[in-house]
Amino acid sequence: MTVSSNFSGDGKQLVITIDQRFDFSLHQQFRDIYNSITTPDLTYTLDLSQTEYMDSSALGMILLLKDHVQLYAGQLIISRPSETVRKILEIAQFQRLMTIE
Amino acid sequence: MPKSQKLALVVDDSKMQCKLLSVLLQEENYRVVVANNGASGVEMYIEHQPDLVLMDINMPIMDGFEATRRIKKLSGAGTLAPLIFITSMDSEQAFIDSVEAGGDSILVRPFTPKVFKAKIKAMQRISDLVDQVKNLQQEQQNDAELAEKMMSGVIEARNFALDKIGVIKKAATIFSGDIQLSALCPNGDINVLLGDFTGHGLRASIGAIPVTETFRAMTKKGFSILEIVAQLNRQMYTLLPGDLFFCASFACISEHDKSAYIFNAGLPDGYLFDDSAKIKRQFTSTHPPLGILPQLLPDAQLEVVQVMKTDRIVFITDGIVEARNKAGDLFGFPRFEIAAIDGISQKDLANTVLNSLDDFCQNCEQEDDISLVDVPCSGWKEIKLSNKVLTPEGVSEDDEYLSNIPNSSPSWSYHLHLTGRLLKTINPIPLIMNQINDLEGAGEHWQSLYTILTELFINGLDHGVLALDSSLKDSAEGFSQYFNERAHRLDKLAENSTNGTQDYVRIALRYFPLSQGGKMVINIKDSGQGFDILDVIKDNSIAMNNGIKLSGRGVELVSQLCDTLEYQEQGTSVTANYIWHN
């Protein structure tokens, strides 16, 4: 499994972790994780510290997640991207669209 | 039966069995050929290419498993002549072995004719389905190839100056999600775009046609590159689904201004190289890809750089730097830069980079579309100066044809008075050129008029309303300082909404048809402090004598294009006469 997720103890944060490659092959799995979650005011943390590579369709998947988060008045945080991934996020200037820690 | 009969091959060493199966098959309207061992079965298969094979297992010379393996190897993927084992070996192992060898089914003796015929029908149904899928695939492939051909006909074939721009375009599938465009602006500048839609294949290429249409139409009408980017962003935002977007780099290169305007939204760094292959500048992405946000970010702005005639601008998509070799290493920026530098010294950047990339990747499967544009900063079509008072043969200069006809009134006139915020947000020149085209029809001679209007309007705005000093543009540092200051003052102008109407530029056109052409009288007035006209002219002539070319407010170019050019009211008003003949 390269996509995993768990709620924080207080249930206010959902952490999604992606290992190795973040690309189109994870499309369905990635969407399944958040699609049924409709809790308002939830913080979604996308942990990319274990992600080695990310392609442009992954950027598209993050945008879809962002749409979902906004729909339920939540917050999206991209957490600790590795150097390669940070570079890709920077080229796409995603720091202008969402929080990257 | 009129329908072409199908052919079955029966392979069995028992003549008795062959006869029996043949009769049953004939009742199902098959023609039948027979072989009595595996080896001759393979030969018969090659010779007759049957639609169905019935295979015994235990036979002399070559058994049924081996014969099946050979036949399946020959028939290859995609074609299915169903092969059924007919056997009395009713064991689990026989069943497994026959599937392993490539058999499609097994029928264990004894069986009734009804069961046999049902089996044949079932197998035939499967093989018909395989045929259908194969035909559909072929059809789709043909359609895709045709569509791709038409799309690149619409898109790339109509690009401007294809011979001067170096291009790499290597699609990962039939359709490319990358797009390269070039188009000539009315004033002789050139607009270039390199774009990359998310993903690749058909899904990624559908946005290419609207992008192409908008880019060409707006360039032709004289919209600035930032206006084109803003419009493409809006268009892609409404057109593309949420997870699709468009990364793109834009350049507007002005040979006569020796400048280039760059915008990079989501592509890897672009490059400015000089003729000794030194990297003079890199253009980093400063904006999210197009189609994500409904509007460009408020601080979106162009990068302005001074360029020499011998410089070149190079854009790449991530397919180049992210191409992988067998070991899984990326091609990366350092390898790209080495190849590009090498390519410039060999005067063929595109092919040198492509060769280096091929050497690196060997025959690895290409994962993403690969593209590059290499654009020289000069060598575009010169602005035609021939419109200036060229008297056709047989017409003397005193003729009414060129005279001013002082008392006649214009056939139409046009006034536009822009104030405050609108000076920042509106580019009036395309609006005006549209009006002129509507009133007088399209024509080559409007190109020069476009240049005259643009230069004079920008002068009025920059040096009049915004009080910017043109001498700043003479040095490389001053050059970017000039454009930063310009953006800053325009913002202030836009914010100052209460007092806004005090700042203005007024454009007035009067059109006089002549017997063999026409005359346009252009007057542009601004709210600025004016300038000492003599100083500018003096400066310019001194500079010219010393062989230096000042930025000189573009006046020199305009005066070459016009019949007359005159400043009045301390330089806050300028009148130009532009005359052409048919």
Image (tube, coloured by chain):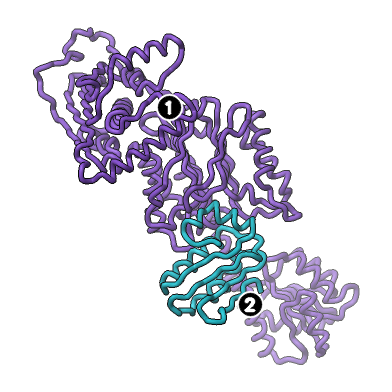
Chain colours: A cyan, B purple
Q: Which residue is mark 1?
A: B473
Disc 2 to disc 1, C-alpha distance:
80 Å
Dot 1 crowding, Cα within 10 Å, few <14, some 14–19, many 20+: some
* Pointer 2 or 1: first along the chain: 2
Q: Which residue is mark 2?
A: B124
Q: In which quadrant of the rendered view does residue B501 lie?
A: top left
Q: Chain of mark 1?
A: B
Check disc 1 and give the amino acid type: Lys
Q: Nearer the viewer, residue B313 or B444?
A: B313
Percent x, y for residue B528? 25, 29
Can you say whether B486 is above or below A20 in the image?
Answer: above
Can you say whether B502 is above or below A35 in the image?
Answer: above
Q: Residue at x 49, y 27 (%)?
A: B378
Q: Nearer the viewer, residue A65 or B538?
A: B538
Q: Is residue B381 visible?
A: no
Q: Residue at x 53, y 30 (%)?
A: B376
State which quarter of the image contains the N terminus of chain B: bottom right
Q: Chain of mark 2?
A: B
Residue reaching furthest to the right: B61
Q: Residue at x 21, y 32 (%)?
A: B506
Check disc 2 and give the amino acid type: Gln
Residue B502 lies left or right of residue A90; in this view the side is left
Q: Say if labels 2 and 1 share a chain.
A: yes
Percent x, y for residue B238? 38, 58
